Amino acid sequence: MFMSIALSLHVLAIVVWVGGMFFAHQALRPAAVDTLEPPLRLQLWVATFKRFFPWVWLCIVLVLATGLWMMMQFPKAPIFVHAMLGLGIVMMLIFMHVFFAPYNRLKKAVAEQRWPDGGNALGQIRTMVGINTVIGIITIIVATAGKFFIT
Ligand code: HEM
C-alpha cells in the first residue's frame, strides 16, 4: 500500500520535473527566440522560472523522500537503484547551482535592465537545463529498462 503511494509520487514528481525541462528547452526556448526581442524574452524567462522552480523544489523533496524510503524496503538495493540515486543527486546539484548562481544573476540583470548580462546568465541556464534533461532521460531509462539488465 505505502509502496504504491511512494512509487506513484516518485514517478509523478519525475514527470513534472523532467517533462517541464524538456518543454522549456525544446519548445518554449526556440519559440521565444523566434518571436521576442531580448528584453521581453528575458522577462518571459524570469516569469517562467518564478513559477516553475518552486515546483522543482517540491519534486526534489518528493523524489528524495520517496526514493530513499523505497530503497530502505529492499534488503539490499539493486545496482540500478544505486545508479538512480547517484544520477538523481547529480541532477539535484545541477539544479541548485542553476537556482543559486545564474538564475540570481538573471533576475538581477533583468531588474536593472542589463540585457546582455541577462542573456549570458540565460545561456548558462540553458546549457545546464539541457544537460539535466539528458541525465533525466538516461535516469528514467536506467530506472525502467535498466532493471531488466542490471539488477
Ligand atoms: C535521488 C534519489 C532516488 C532514489 C533513492 C530513487 C529510488 C528509487 C526506488 C527504490 C525505486 C523503486 C524501484 C523498484 O520498485 O524496483 C524507484 C523507482 C523509479 N525511479 Fe527513482 N530514485 C531516485 C531518483 C530518481 C530520478 C532522478 C529519476 C528519473 C529522472 C527516477 C526515476 C524512477 C522511475 C521512472 C521509477 C519507476 C521504475 C519502475 O517501477 O519501473 N528516480 N526509484
Image: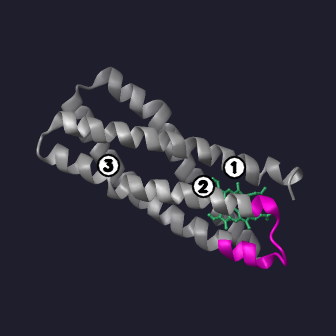
For the magenta stretch, what is the residue range? 68-81
Q: Are marks 1 and 3 in contact (CB under 8 Å)?
A: no
Name which of mark 1 and mark 3 comes first in the sequence.
Answer: 3
Check disc 2 and report the residue beneath it: 14
Check disc 1 and report the residue beneath it: 140
Q: How is the image coloured?
A: one colour
**Left or right of residue 20: residue 51:** left
Percent position of residue 28, x then y? 41, 33
Query: Given the image, on which type of amino acid does mark 1 rest?
Result: Ile
Circle 3 Cα neighbour tier, 10 Å, few/some/many (<14 / 14–19 / ≥20): many
Check disc 3 and report the residue beneath it: 102
Circle 2 Cα neighbour tier, 10 Å, few/some/many (<14 / 14–19 / ≥20): many
- Residue furthest to the left: 112
Q: Secondary structure at mark 2?
A: helix
Mark 1 beta carbon near ligand 1 (under 8 Å): yes
Mark 3 beta carbon near ligand 1 (under 8 Å): no
Looking at the rendered image, the disc whose residue lies closer to the viewer, 1 or 3, is 3
Percent position of residue 103, x then y? 31, 50
Question: Marks 2 and 1, Cα distance to the nearest angstrom?
Answer: 9 Å
Query: Given the image, on which type of amino acid does mark 2 rest?
Result: Ile
**Left or right of residue 114: residue 62:** right
